[in-house]
Every structure is written in C-alpha cells, then in structure tokens.
Amino acid sequence: MQANDVRALKGAAIPTIAVGLIVVVVAALLGGGAGALGAAIGLAVVAVFFTAGLVAVTSAGRVSPQMMMLAAVLGYLVKVVLLMILLRSFAGATVFSPRAFGLAVIICTIVWTIGEIRAFLKLKLLYVEPGTRVPGQGDPR
C-alpha cells in the first residue's frame, strides 16, 4: 500500500471509528447492552468491509486502471450483497439489536464515504505523468 493509500485509509477510518464509538454509546443509552452490541457489530462490519475494499482497489490499481475499475465495481457489488445477507440473517436476532446494527451500518458508511472523499480531495495527485511524450508529436527541440 502506497503512502497516498494509507492517508486515504486513515482519512476515512479515523472519523468512522470516532463516530462509530459515539453511535455505540448512544445505542447503549437507548437500547442497553443489546443496542451497544448491535452498534459495535455494525461498526466492525463497516470497518472491515471498507478497509478490504480500499486495499483491493489500490492493489488492483497497481496492475492497470481497468483492473482498478473492475475491483471497485465488484467490491461494491460484493459489499451490497453481503450487507443484504447480514441484515436478512440478523433480522430476528435476540442477542443484539438488529435496529442498532442497521443504523450503525448506515451512519458509519456515510461517515466513511465522506472521510474517503475528503481524504482523496486533500491528496496532491498528478493528473499527468511528468516527462511523458504525447504520441504523434515530434521532439520539441
């Protein structure tokens, strides 16, 4: 993982964990231990899913831009399907609050996305590789 990728990961993960801990505390106050456990599981699911997605996209980006796009699209599809499966299977859970789990997933996903966008906007990435030649144009000398 390159330094820019680590900065993007930290820019998304740190606010998500901070807000997620606040969500866990609020869920504990409103729903007791079951609410806190549901929110904590939701925070963990978002942190693991999105970290794995970012790692997959950045490692695919080293291969080619097309692989990066494929990894991003497939990663999104896998995340959505797995979240739907988790939400469906946890609907009748009694050990923790499925409502707190769902709300924590939604809130943490929004915070992660905003943090990732903010982190990528702050990165100083070059749009053009310096020193490359334009095809079809001769030597400028």
Image: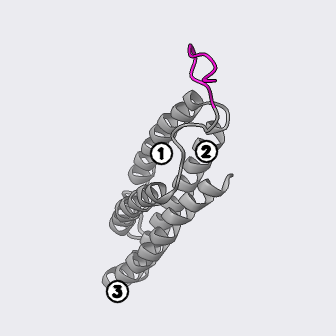
- Residue 29 image label: 3
Sequence-first tag of 1 and 3: 3
- Residue 79 image label: 1
Residue 87 shows in the view:
yes
Q: Which residues are magenta?
A: 132-141
Which amino acid, mark 2?
Thr
Q: Is residue 71 above or below residue 18?
A: above
Q: Residue at x 42, y 55 (%)?
A: 117
Residue beneath disc 2: 58
Q: Mark 1–mark 3 contact, CB under 8 Å?
A: no
Sequence-first tag of 1 and 2: 2
Q: CA distance from mark 1 to mark 3?
A: 29 Å
In front: 7, or 15?
7
Q: Say what secondary structure mark 3 lies in.
A: helix
Which quarter of the picture shows residue 59? top right
In front: 74, or 90?
74
Q: Of circles 1 and 2, which is in front? A: 2
